[in-house]
Image (tube, grey):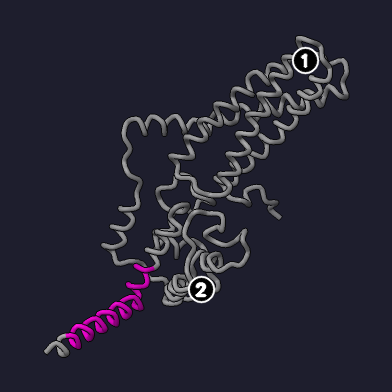
Amino acid sequence: MTHLFCTSVLSALCIAAFAADEQAGQPGGLAASVHAIFARSCAMCHGPQVEHPPNGFGYVLDLKRLVDGHDLVVPGEPGNSKLFQRITSGDPDEHMPPPSSSAQQLSTDEIETVRQWIAAGAPPLAGADETAALHGAQPAQRGASGSAAEWLGRWHVAVLHLPIGLLLAAALAQVVLLFAKGSAWLDGATRWCLWVGAPGAVISVLTGLVHAGYAGYADETVELHESLGITTCIVALVSLVGWEIAQRTGNRAIRLVSIVLLIAAAALVAAAGHTGGVMVFGASFLAWPW
């Protein structure tokens, strides 16, 4: 009797496992499996909750839209689908998720599941399942304090232009002075730009750090952007202090150091601005059109 019972249990388990495999192999089962893979490994940067996803790609959980998104997913053609090319690429700069990301990398079996899904015509989730999946992926509501902090963080996109313009103008003024000795008024312009630009960099960095936390940014470019912004802020402040000391003491060595730091701050803020553009518009947003 015991032997018969054990045999029956094992048979039931085998049948259930076989049925699960069969279901996973069906178009609907493939879609659900692929959706789960994307939700775990891709949605951190490309999900609907990310306010400014890299390259504007924030719909990885919308399987229907993936198929409609140019050549991201070409039904029946995994090799011609950019999404499949990226998850199988051996180039660290092209591979997704990025090796430096905290997102979990796809296993060999998961990559094969994605390939099978595309080869099967990239079917969408069932209507009710897709509606529930997309609805469940929306960002949660925040409390009043979170909303206030998020609102303050959004000012980053307005404030950041102030230190960029002023630090570049201050550095340009000093470069002009190298060739136009009689333009002493440019020293006054440099001082004014530093006094507004350096504190402006502080405000830009603070609002940027808050904004990154609420906007859901999670990418190595964000880390580089933050590092460049913080370094710009420090260098600009030191340059401002050195400029004031040089102005009050007439120390030419300190003045020279301050000018060098100012030019470095201008280069850093330009680089920070560029990485910010990459985050919003993609790496090719300044690519030559021909």
**Occupied quadrant, residue 202:** top right
Residue sitting at x 79%, y 20%: 254
Q: Nearer the viewer, mark 1 or mark 2?
A: 1
Residue sitting at x 50%, y 31%: 207
Label 1: which secondary element: helix
* Magenta residue check for 13: yes
The image shows residue 263 at horizontal and vertical percentages of 75, 30
Q: Nearer the viewer, residue 260 or 275?
A: 260
- Above or below, 202 relative to 280: above
Residue sitting at x 57%, y 44%: 223
Which residue is under mark 2? 78
**Occupied quadrant, residue 143:** top left
Q: Residues within 10 Å of mark 2 (few under 14, many from 20)?
A: many
Circle 1: residue type:
Ala
Majority secondary structure in the magenta region: helix
Judge left or right: residue 290 versus residue 71. right
Provide the residue span drawn in magenta.
6-33
Which residue is under mark 1? 246
Mark pair 1, 2: CA separation:
64 Å
* Magenta residue check for 211: no
Q: Earlier in the sequence, mark 1 or mark 2?
A: 2
- Above or below, 95 relative to 25: above
